[in-house]
Amino acid sequence: MDVSEIIIPGDTPGTEWRLPVLRFKGHDPKAPKIYIQAALHAGELPGTVLLHFLCERLRQAEDQGGIAGDITIVPQANPIGAAQSHFGELQGRFDLGSRTNFNRDFPLISIVDRATLTEDLDDYPATDRLKRQLLHMALGADLVLDLHCDDESLQYAYIDEAFWPEAADLAAALEMEAVLLSDGESSAFEEAVGFAWKYEVPGERRPRLPGKLSVTVELRGKRDVDPVLAKKDADGLWHFLSARGIVGDGKPAATVFSGPAVPLDNVEIIRTPEGGAVLFHRDIGERVAEGDLLATIVTRPGQPGGSIELTAPQDGLILTRTSDRLVRRRGDLMKIVCDEPSKASRKAGTLEN
């Protein structure tokens, strides 16, 4: 395993950020190359600990000549966000300087322009330098996994329709309970990777990308940083790498993904009409029917009519739930995966900012 660091100068005198990069060199030039990163939202750590255990297994395989395809791993992809705390609370989702989500505003370029990402880096602030170098590394691979987590959540993924159903092997290997089929219309990291491949010829969109994959994996919730889960997920990811011919001597028996795979339009996002204390009546993983009571919002404690009841707009599977128990007006409470499109309007691209 080769360990190197990318040094990102800070935007003020005397500061810099160090980005560790772990690389395993494959012996088969025809094998797929894979890039895996975790903790782009710096406080989302299930992927970081998964990669810790996966690298143990990869080092053993390397000693035995079992690495076929090149593997690049960035287990802590956002040192800038990891250093941001406000009154003792980590602020790893948004850059405090630009107020931009660390997983947005990645450059949308054609793969033929990959080299331009790292040209004239001194012209960019630290957060943009970070994004450009992460994207540059990813575009050197065939398969790209961006490991995140939600708040309270089942295991699921955002996968561009251009990679489905070929990517069902990843969903099966990681025992995902749902797949959300995205339209690839945002500047999030995994969609910027897909954009570069789709527009290999600038101005001409390729609808399908066989042999390629760029995906956001949501490894349950923020508190699911657990050795048992991390080792289980590392085993699942190893199974995927083996099935794709990147590691191991032979391909394992295929597993089947049995969960729902639905467009983003089929996700009901339950939002609170007023701020208050949340009393949940249903949990993640439960199936609900239209009209079922989901949550009560206590808006004016102790007063007549001081609470609001929220019900399911249609049948579905509760995929995520907020861990906050005091929410603001229009705050997100739940995502429910449904068979039918939501009647609520949705902007193109990912579900959240």
Image: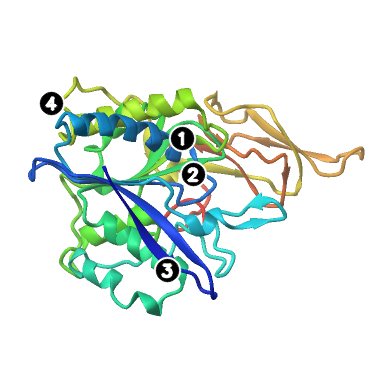
Closer to the chain start, of discs 3 and 1, is 3
Task: Give left or right: position of 250 versus 345.
Answer: left
Residue shown at 72% from the left, 55% from the top: 87
**Circle 4 sits in a helix, a strand or a loop, which is it?**
loop
Residue 333 on image: x %, y % = 62, 41
Q: Which residue is mark 1?
A: 338
**Circle 2 sits in a helix, a strand or a loop, which is it?**
loop
Please name which of the two marks, 4 or 2, marks the residue nearer to the observer. Answer: 4
As measured in the structure, the alpha-carbon distance from the residue carrying label 3 to the one carrying label 4 is 40 Å
Q: Nearer the viewer, residue 33 or 309?
A: 33
Give, as a three-letter code, the residue at label 2: Ser
As measured in the structure, the alpha-carbon distance from the residue carrying label 4 to the one carrying label 2 is 46 Å
Residue 181 on image: x %, y % = 35, 43
Give, as a three-letter code, the residue at label 4: Asp
Residue shown at 92% from the left, 40% from the top: 303
Q: Which residue is mark 3?
A: 128
Q: Which residue is mark 2?
A: 342
Residue shown at 42% from the left, 52% from the top: 77
Please name which of the two marks, 3 or 4, marks the residue nearer to the observer. Answer: 4
- Asked if marks 4 and 2 touch (Cβ < 8 Å), the reply is no
Closer to the chain start, of discs 4 and 2, is 4
Task: Answer yes or no: is residue 103 visible.
Answer: yes
Give, as a three-letter code, the residue at label 1: Cys
Q: Nearer the viewer, residue 329 or 90?
A: 90
